[in-house]
Amino acid sequence: MRDQGKAAAVASDLPIPVAHQFDDARQQHEAAAMGMWIFLATEILFFGGLFTGYAVYRAVEPQGFHEASRHLDLLLGTLNTGLLLTSSLTMALAVHSAENGLRRPTIGWLLTTSMLGLGFLAIKGYEYAHKVHEHLWPGPHFVAPPDASRGFEQFFVLYVSMTGLHAIHMAAGLLVMWVMVIILWRSRHVARHSNFVEMFGLYWHFVDIVWIFLFPLLYLIDRS
Amino acid sequence: MSVVSPAPPLRLKESYLSVSFTIRSWLLSTDHKRIGILYLLSITALFLFGGAAAVAMRVELMTPQADVVRAEVYNRMFTVHGVIMVWFFLIPSIPAVLGNFLIPLMIGARDLAFPKLNLASWYVFMAGAAFTLWAIVRGGVDTGWTFYTPYSSTYSNSYVMLTATGIFITGFSSIFTGLNFIVTIHTMRAPGLQWFRLPLFVWSLYATSLILVLATPVLAISLGLIALERLFGFGIYDPNKGGDPLLFQHLFWFYSHPAVYIMILPGMGVVSETIACFSRKAVFGYKVVAMSSLAIAVLGFLVWGHHMFVSGQSTYAGLVFSLLSFLVAIPSAIKTFNWTATLYKGQITFATPMLYALGFIGLFTIGGLTGLVLASLAVDVHVHDTYFVVAHFHYIMVGGMVMAYLGGIHFWWPKMTGRMYPEGWARFSAILVFVGFNLTFFPQFLLGYLGMPRRYHTYPAEFQVLNVMSTAGASILGVGYLFPLTYLLWSLRYGPRAESNPWNATGLEWQTPSPPPTYNFKETPVVTEGPYHYETGE
């Protein structure tokens, strides 16, 4: 299981620092990747509770969900989907650059990714503000249209909870991304941090995939 | 025992306890052994706190009428007892203390895969505990540990949010610990340590970690939705807004039923180790016992609906959940029968850990079989929410897990501290715990069957005899817990020094000095055979 003393096969002249509990860089990388995938599995179950709630309430009140879905802005939702998918591309390019030890491109692609992420959050914030203004934000000030079916408010409860939890994950990702940019900015050897960039990339793609499920479930109900 | 060469005498400086004595060196340590000790100290304090609430309840229940506390206070006491014991004692008990300490030693590694994450898990745990204790000091919470909606989301006027926040935060420490264990067991085994050479303790903690990692996030989201409802009026569980309070029960039990297995699987691991050691035999059917841990973990995710037989769930769903609950009995019975078969023709010595292990087998069997009674649809309607349920799960969690925890602490105490405890006192208190436990909880089966509901501070006069018996048992049990606390502390200073392998046990953790050095092994051990080669040696 352990081949001790073998240098890691990473495109860098300098050996990657190996923490004391590991035998070599390969074992360290294997552990980090596995840890990240398990963390993402916990995230799936975290969102899973909300998806369960969505499945139950939509099955019980399809008409209310259909009506409420029409109050979402399809154009902005589509635009956001585009931004996020593009940010996954730039994230993948950042990981690729880091693995090849290219410092400036790594930083550049990370900053591009974070700009796209910021754009997504700005549009999301605009949509939220609009919902508050229209009294479609769930809570004490919610006012459903007089002819609304049952389940109308529940749709907005789920819309805000699900996209809100997603947005929190985006915001946390942006913070980590900026810390990473600072670290890379100060460091000379990007390859030493390529593990970090790669694991963060997995997280970013995960957040993206959550949105790929949210978008049709919330914006595209019965649109054909 | 040809394999075990006596470890060379250790210079005192090398042991993990004596590398440094400053408080800072403990609070910032990333050594899995020191973090295990930090957890040991914290959960012992929390256990005493949760135990005090239980004592107060038993005192109140001595007489049929209310004489010590009002109903509101009583509600807060059983909630505090449940919250503290479940999330701040039982769930971290064996995993965070013994698992942290032993997994790297048992697999021949220098530490867990993520030592900093391990330390972070302790801080997160303490932060969650602080929130919860703060809520209790301010006046407590009265929803019961289950936080059922709409009581918790709409009506309760107690500190629900503060307590739920504490539990939410503590959940991260569970996830960190589980994640760390899974990755460590996968990637850091010593050369030659194949999966089917792992000790059963490691197998059971692997299964536990799967549950910790996959169930805890669901608890987090169900508590998060309560927060949205209480703080912002979101109404996901509120029928007035198209929500359904039953969704909470589904989400909550999707976590909390698997959590029951978090609270028993590690105990089964400890029992497997001690039974093998003190009957000098390999565990009968090793592979089946290992796989039954995984089977319990998987099946445990499919049975949550048996908590909702009287919640208006469809009868067909109830039927399926009932059947699935019966299926969990199969891997549990496999373990029980295989431990018994291990004893057969073994050279049994009744050392303290063995007394706890034998107690575990008996009490777990009672707890498990009464679980089948509760899993039967029709019978459950009669005993639901009575003391029968209380007795059932205390037989699993106290008769099972706490017995195993104490057994494990005694078994590995020489390894953890380098000292031997006084065997006579230890055996005496093991018996005291067993007697006190049965006297406390067996009468509760009868009370529940006769119809006494749980969570009331008063009861009809005809239940008094059984309640007095239960309170008497609880006081014996309390003394039984205080004894080990005293003599184990005593042994730290006055106990004789332990050899590296005082029980003549197999397992890599016994091949390094007691207490182990920070780096665990001078040379990474190479494993050539299974974990319980007892018959070959001597």
Image (cartoon, grey):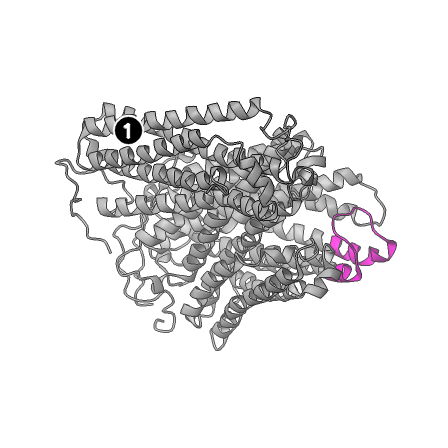
Outermost residue, left side: A13
Q: Quadrant of the N terminus of chain B?
A: bottom left
Across and down, in percent, residue B125 comes to 50, 38
Q: Residue at x 44, y 45 (%)?
A: A44
Q: Residue at x 45, y 56 (%)?
A: B207
Q: Which residues lie in the magenta part?
A: B445-471
In this picture, residue A208 sits left or right of residue B148:
left
State whether residue B88 appears in this view: yes
Q: Can you identify the residue that label 1 sits on? A: A110
Across and down, in percent, residue B242 comes to 65, 40
Q: Residue at x 46, y 39 (%)?
A: A214
Outermost residue, right side: B461
Q: Is residue B70 above or below residue B329?
A: above
- In which image quadrant can residue A93 be found? top left
State whether residue B486 appears in this view: no
Outermost residue, front side: A224
Kindly identify the amino acid type of the residue bearing the numbered disc 1: Leu
Q: Quadrant of the C terminus of chain B?
A: bottom left
Q: Nearer the viewer, residue B349 or B434?
A: B434
B5 drawn magenta:
no
Tell me which secondary structure the magenta stretch mostly adopts.
helix
Q: Is residue B173 above or below residue B404?
A: above
Across and down, in percent, residue A84 comes to 36, 33
- In which image quadrant can residue B14 be found? top left
Name the chain letter of the residue that bears numbered label 1.
A
Q: Nearer the viewer, residue B354 or B367?
A: B367
What count of labels does the image hold? 1
